Image: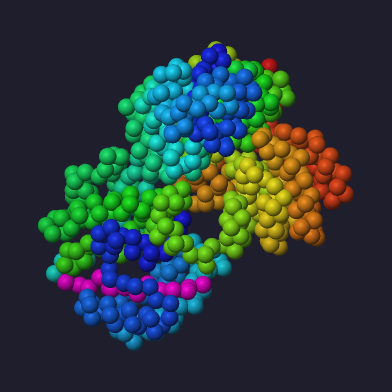
Amino acid sequence: MNIHEYQAKSILREAGVPVPAGDVAFTVEEAVGCAMRIMSETGTDTIAVKAQIHAGGRGKGGGVKIAKSIEEVAVFAEQILGMNLITHQTGPKGKLVRKLLVEQGIYQKGVSEVKEFYMSILLNRASGTNMIMYSPQGGMDIEAVAANTPELIFKEEIDPLGIQSFQARRIAFNLGLSGKAFSQMVKFVIALYGAYLKADASLFEINPVVKNSSDDIFAADAKVNVDDNALFRHSIIEAMRDRDEEDPAELEASDNNLNFVKLDGNVGCMVNGAGLAMATMDIIKLSGGDPANFLDVGGGANAKTVAAGFRIILKDPNVKAILVNIFGGIVRCDRVAQGIVDAYKEVGNISVPVIVRLQGTNANEGKELIDGSGLKVSTATTLQEAAHLVKSVV
Amino acid sequence: MSVLVNRNSRILVQGFTGSEGTFHATQMIEYGTNVVGGVTPGKGGQQHIGLPVFDTVKDGVLATAADVSVIFVPPSFAADAIMEAAEAGIKVIVCISEGIPTADMVKVRHYLKSYPNSRLVGPNCPGVISPGEAKVGIMPGFIHQKGCVGVVSRSGTLTYEAVDQLTKSGLGQSTCIGIGGDPIIGTTTLDAVRMLMDDVETKGIILIGEIGGGMEAEAAYWIKEHGTKPVVGFIAGQTAPKGRRMGHAGAIIGGADDTAAAKMRIMRECGIHVVESPASIGSTMKKLLE
């Protein structure tokens, strides 16, 4: 699950990771109020006004501004709230900004030079352990750093027993720190790893980690993904889900317990099983079409789930045909076929051609049921036949 | 022969009295699998579908000499069930449960290092079947046929698809291993491929992978050096977008190396017969073995 930066920072703060003072604001007035409070509490003379959307690249898109006065906070908040923010991660349509993070500025010049680092925590699938990835080159696109100067990317594998102090020290040394900044970074790394475990996160990306002019360390930005499978033990984090940030079709699918990913092709598909669903998308492509979605109806394909699947797929005006691909194992094909017939009646005028491929348990009974229903549905039993039928309609 | 499970395997079902455990244990027994009992904490001493129930895996092992377990417990308790099975001396632990938190699996993987004689298959997998001998999992038994092709796959229904093609082509299967769709799993693609290469009954191997992770590439490089049998490969997700999870927790493209295209290229370079369409898995293997 994705969460906003202000929510991510609340998780970090709770776990003792230093983050700039800040609060979420939904209106210009709230933003000004937050800014005044932060200025008086921290003595900062700058305030960061940051658009809160589920996408990176907000700064380049004009969604992050540094205000030098309360008046500027109001101006920037007015500009950013309600704007349609387009970044390399939002796609060309962009995303509506509904809220802001108003935050203490931490880039003031002083005795010591301000520095930006990169730090992320993620699973190393090959070793089955978490690792901390970090770089002295912070504040920029880490993929570019990895491509141009791979020697500036460091990795620290963390044993399941926990992070050790020597590892945190090694990280601080590799980042070129000494004195107070060094000891602050050691504390920062240990607290950050603790926060990662505590939240059952699947990704922490702090870019940048900032060392300010007083040699204090802060998480200046925070991207946090949480393991969906662990949400059952994190009710506070589960409540952070922002339905406004999700694609409406994907939202409806998740409300119906369907596993759905929206794509931009012209042939919709509905399949039981994730692997077969991906393979079905590939078959659509090989047959000259482009998959409009990934949709796994799971093991319990019935009239209700199939009807929901049809409705969700048909919301997309680009869809020119739908391929239903079911391999019946424990699920009986005749039951699924009945589900398709019922769903057809429930959804009403399905105007695009539907191809149903049934294989496995009671496949013939299922095929007969559909063929005898009078519906304009073509049926297939082998994958190859289904592929040919797709080819004939695209 | 066959690998992992056979007619002599003695199987315990963890989560025996739950609805999933009851249904699939019954199906396994009907297939002819040697299920010797089950475990449900608090129900020890009872009988369920004609077999003894034990409070702990250890009790079950002592009473029945079970050497294989299959896990149907809910995901929040599944990591514990895996570790309990290893501690009790189970040799092959097949975990069907889907949705185990990754942090729990980090722990499990670490724990299992102390039990080198226990092999975990899964989680989030359909299980293992050696047709005609033992079905340890949730796959439909009737589509299988005893034969000479080993199948390794991260998926459920896509495996059934390949199995169905192999059965209809007359080749059949020696053992089908569903290794699971999670980011951390017990038996890797390479582990499964090695077992099948060493199995005298297996004449060819079907390797079904998907986007995400580096397991297929790892297996491919090994096959290039040590492979002795034809391998047909398919990677699901050629049309999957980057950064989106495609159903399986582990099916997500992270970088340039774990796309379907990259995996297919590496597999081809290593001498694996990679098919673009899952419809030609069976026919390709048939040609190779003729």
Say if the magenta span includes residue B202.
no
In this orientation, which residue lies closer to the viewer: A115 or B245? B245
Report whether residue B189 is seen. no
Query: In percent of the image, x 59 and y 43: which residue is there?
Result: A274
Task: Please provide percent x and percent y for residue B4.
Answer: 50, 20
| Residue at the extreme front | B46
Q: Is any atom of residue A220 visible in this view?
A: yes
User: In the displayed structure, would residue A97 be above or below residue B75?
Assistant: below
Identify the residue at horizontal 19%, vertical 64% (top origin): A216
Report the residue at 34% width, 32% height from top: B111
Looking at the image, which is closer to me, B84 or A393? Answer: B84
Relative image position of residue A20 (x, y in whole percent): 27, 68
State the image quarter where residue A351 is shown. Answer: bottom right
In the image, residue A320 sits, relative to residue B240, either above or below, namely below
Q: Report which quarter residue A326 is drawn in.
A: top right
Q: Quadrant of residue A210?
A: bottom left
Left/right placement of residue B275 relative to residue A200 reads right
Q: Residue furthest left?
A: A179
Q: Nearer the viewer, residue B13 or A376?
A: B13
Q: Position of residue B252 (x, y in %)?
A: 50, 46
Q: Main secondary structure of the magenta part?
A: loop
Q: Does B10 appear above or below B240? A: above
Of the 4 image quadrants, the one containing the C terminus of chain B is: top right
Magenta stretch containing residue A104, yes or no?
yes
Instruction: State which region is magenta.
Output: A96-110
Quadrant in which the N terminus of chain B appears: top right
Q: Residue at x 41, y 23 (%)?
A: B59
Between A183 and A259, the one nearer to me in the picture: A259
